[in-house]
Amino acid sequence: MNINQKKRKSVSGSIYLFDTYERKERLFVPLKPGRVKMYTCGPTVYDYPHIGNLRAYIVADVLRNTLEFNGYKVKQVINITDVGHLTSDADSGEDKMELSARKQKRSAFEIAELYTGIFKQNLLALNIKPPSVWSKATDHISEQITLIQRLEKAGYTYLTSDGVYFDTSRLSNYGHLARLGVAGIKPGARVDIGEKNKITDFALWKFSPKDRKRQMEWQSPWGIGFPGWHIECSAMAMKYLGETIDIHTGGIDHIPVHHTNEIAQSEAATGKQFVRYWMHVAFLTVNGKKMAKSEHNFVTLQDIVDRGYDPLAFRYLVLTSHYRAGLNFTWPSLRGAQKALLSLREKVSILGNKKVSPDKQELQEFKRCINNDFNTPQAIALLWKIADSPLTPQKKAAILEFDKVLRLNLGYLLSEKIPEEIRVLVQKREDLREDNKWEESDRVRQEIIKKGYEVRDTSAGPKVIRRGL
């Protein structure tokens, strides 16, 4: 059955999601009633995030919004990988942070700060809510060392001349997430085996080179060095969310190595299930090709803005495809998404601002769509079905309720084209108001005023106008 057409007759409020570990859709039941602990794999901040990366965060945002729409309280952690991610994505090559620093003639810490800021700005521009916790790898070195010591004490580690490694032969179910078929893996299929006992073994702590000093290195019980890429996420997830978490999200590229190794080291250390539901987002391609600088198709959110598009047009485009289906990006498809988004906003804005209760039938239908493995294409189709029918205040109210999940700013009343930096500030203010952070929201409002714009709050949403109009 086509992924975008599948429907489920479910009990109202029941959420089904596809669990990568089990390879099937499962009814979501959190560890603690009413509360969800969610970990989202963050970026390695050595370069600009491209729109393929950003798709995964839009999907994670829809997941979080859906959970909150259903009454759950969500604690979400997004990590920032600012050390330890080598160019091979495994255990060889140069640290991506230090390589970027050398090319740009800056320090690795400056590179991390620069691209972390750009990433966070991208999330704001895409109306993605900030997480409950931002967690930087370099701020959690002691937690990573402690976790490695737990593994060492349990007998899961061994030393080589270049680091401390995890012994995957101790686990009978290693690789289940990726269905690796470990016995059939040959040396060279994933990484150079070097001094490792087994091709699937992976680094927990890497030693600094003896002939030069790294910019990022720390003392440890095993010698001066830096953490492996995989240990970072386990240590930070367990610190903020506990030893078992409800949902872990990321791109499908993380399945065979990164997430497989997270499971191995976490469960070896605790003896408990690490993640109850794994959710992975499919690739975004550009004109049918994988996004890469060598293909000259590396597209950033700033590229989209520079061509005159609203970043939320890209968000709309992402929502028209199911997260488990591949999405092919083209500029004509983005142009179509922008036209559709503007048309939706115009249709919604025609009605007055009378405050009424949303149409209950429409809300239930929306829940059936979005609770069915976060089927945003069905939700968008329902949105258009309502928008193209004779709109009533109740139906408009329902659309604005949908937008709490979709976050397309369908209630914005824009009197003219508003600069992107103003729109981002307006959304930041809305998020702060939603969290009852009134003093902070007022500071953002003052910043908007200083830039020549004004926000007027209406029952249909914020109205943004240039001062003096």
Image (tube, grey):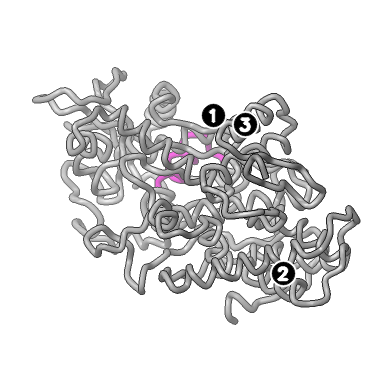
Q: Which residue is mark 3?
A: 444
Left or right: where does residue 273 sit relative to residue 220? right
- Per the model, the C-alpha gap separating discs 1 and 3 is 32 Å
Q: Amino acid at mark 2?
A: Leu
Q: Residue furthest front?
A: 468
Instruction: Considering the whole magenta stretch, tell me its main secondary structure.
Output: helix
| Magenta part of the chain | 261-272
**Which label sits on residue 463?**
none
Among the two numbered marks 2 and 3 on one chain, the one whose residue lies closer to the N terminus: 2
Q: Amino acid at mark 3?
A: Val
Is 47 situated above or below 53? above
Nearer to us of marks 1 and 3 is 3
Q: Is residue 326 magenta?
A: no
Q: Nearer the viewer, residue 17 or 126?
A: 126
Q: Which residue is mark 1?
A: 239
Left or right: where does residue 350 sit relative to residue 276? right
Q: Residue furthest right?
A: 356
Contact between marks 1 and 3 (CB within 8 A): the answer is no
Nearer to us of marks 1 and 2 is 2
Q: Amino acid at mark 1?
A: Lys
Q: Determine whether the residue tagged by mark 2 lies in a helix, strand or loop.
A: helix
Residue, x 67% and y 31% (percent of image)? 441
- Per the model, the C-alpha gap separating discs 1 and 2 is 40 Å
The tally of labels here is 3
Q: Can you tell which quarter of the image residue 348 is in? A: bottom right
Q: Nearer the viewer, residue 161 or 255?
A: 255
Among the two numbered marks 1 and 3 on one chain, the one whose residue lies closer to the N terminus: 1
Residue, x 37% and y 38% (percent of image)? 115
Q: Determine whether the residue tagged by mark 1 lies in a helix, strand or loop.
A: helix
Residue, x 55% and y 38% (percent of image)? 77
Q: Which residue is mark 2?
A: 383
